[in-house]
Amino acid sequence: MEDLVIRDADVVDGSGAPSYRADVVVDDGRITAVVKEAAAAGCQRPRAVCELDAEGLVLSPGFIDMHAHSDLALLRDPDHSAKAAQGVTLEVLGQDGLSYAPVDDRTLAEVRRAITGWNGHGDDVDFDWRSVGEYLDRLDRGIAVNAAYLIPQGTVRALAVGWEDRAATPAELERMRRLVAEGMEQGAVGMSSGLTYTPGMYAPDTELAELCRVVASYGGYYCPHHRSYGAGALEAYREMVALTREAGCSLHLAHATMNFGVNRGRAPELLALLDRALADGADITLDTYPYTPGSTTLAAMLPSWANEGGPDAVLERLADDGTAERIRHHLESVGSDGCHGVPIEWDTIEISGVADPALADFVGRTVEESARRRGEPPWATARRLLLADRLATSILQHVGHEENVRAIMRHRVHTGGSDGILQGSKPHPRAYGTFPHYLGHYVRELGVLTLEECVAHLTGRPAARLRLPDRGLVREGHRADLVLFDPATVAAGSTFENPRRLPTGIPYVLIDGRFVMEDGRRTDVLAGRAVRRTP
């Protein structure tokens, strides 16, 4: 007897091929048989200890979130329904160049403060690791969904160089190369950067190329949040393509949007740039979330010179009236590099979360709205928040364009990533809704993608980028990371007003052949583990 047979499912197998009706047999965490309806006619159908009637449901591989910020959430929240209920069976962590390994005690404390707005401060987490391998071992104790890890280049630079805007010495560069090599050897799948975040943004292309050569030597990929998504977006994309081609490294473009007014309708220019590189032999993929607003921290909007030296130095500058006025001028008149070279529009900056409960009244309002209520200029309100919340304030930035979102998601190298920040009382709904929103809104309601195309974007294609030979497809011998959803009802429950609502129409999710969602409810199963780079 096998463990489980899923009967009469409409299988969308992750390859992009047409769906078919089949029984799928699972045993010991793997798919042991896929018996198509035609082959089963007149024959004895497979039997198992448990049987699940999947009539009317689509069976697909589990969804892979190529851009996740669950680095601490997976450790503090065993339930993790934000992702499990979406059908996510694997998340890629260590994004945007800042995460929690490799570190020493000093760097860990600095990074925790720098990305409190992404992940919380972590007071409820036992930081009993320092290396990449130790962090992956910590995940192996049991988590809600599987997780892969990117070495964060900004953290590596903080560890080897510090938070200053200067070139690395030859010895420091060699130490960074060694740290990246060690992380890859310990199981990381690649390296990320946050090139609008300190201290990673201080690295010149020559330094990044040296680190990418190390990543490439281990078969990994480079995942940059590049230097501009606004005024200099196309040039920033070109820079990353040229850099990785010089280094011989695969490239995966993080949250590949074309935002701000200067980029309305310009997605075809980006896609043409990528098509030329792909035709010339480049290895490129990208991910996006199916929404227009972005999400980050309020401190990320500041110019890079104001962020130099780490959080304490930033707070000192903000407290000084003269320096604060200079920051305001860069934000509102020049176009801060933290705001992607575009003068900030305070009516687009919505506060989504604060660390200090006393500031809760700001959440859900734009900076401009709160400033009007207080009778002061918007910068005075923003400065007040940054100082009082000690840089931990998170925001939504309403600067996207729907036509760009749709154009990019159609591209043949596109994959899905939530970029989901789970912190704050009103986080971006993408954290809870990205994958059902693709299936419900963009497939069923709008027809932007066919169901088979969309599932391939969310499963088979990301598994190929991660070089996982036994995931991402419904195939015999593959791991039984599977999702069953109703194509007629699947939808994101999360909205901008109620961002923590769980999706509908996804009754079953399996990881390693075990139900983590059953009859639409989260079980107590912790089947997730670290997914290490395949040599």
Image (spheres, rainbow, N blue to C red):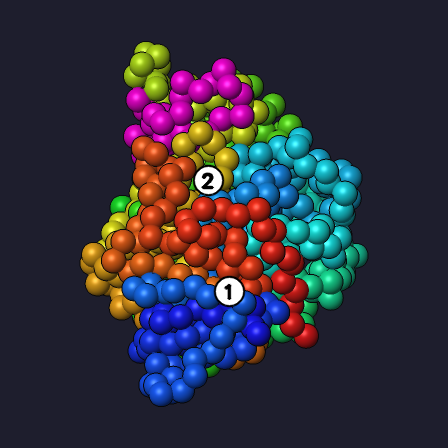
Residue 399 relative to residue 243: left or right:
left
Crowd band around label 2 with a 10 angstrom C-alpha radius: few (<14), some (14–19), many (20+): many
Which residue is drawn at the image coordinates 54% and 67% (left, top)? 49
- Which quarter of the figure is the C terminus placed in? bottom right
Mark 1: few/some/many CA within 10 Å (<14, 14-19, 20+)? few
The x, y position of residue 337, in whole percent, is: 45, 43
Per the rendered image, the range of residues in magenta is 343-369
Residue located 73% across and 40% down the image? 127
Q: What residue sits 53% from the left and 48% below the top?
A: 523
Q: Quadrant of residue 116?
A: top right
Residue 76 picture location, percent across and down: 62, 39
Question: Viewer-proximal residue, 347 or 91?
Answer: 91
**Disc 2 residue type (three-letter):** Thr
Q: Position of residue 16 (x, y in %)?
A: 36, 75
- Circle number at residue 296: 2
Which circle's residue, 1 or 2, is located before the other in the chain? 1
Give the label, 1 or 2, closer to the camera: 1
Q: Quadrant of residue 449?
A: bottom left
Q: Decide whether residue 148 is among the magenta residues.
A: no
Q: Distance between the Cα atoms at labels 1 and 2?
A: 44 Å
* Residue 488 visible (yes or no): yes
| Residue type (three-letter) at the residue carrying disc 1 | Cys
Q: Is residue 201 above or below residue 481?
A: above
User: Hey, which residue is sitting farthest left in the picture?
Assistant: 446
Residue beneath disc 1: 50
Q: Which of the image's four quarters has the N terminus?
A: bottom right
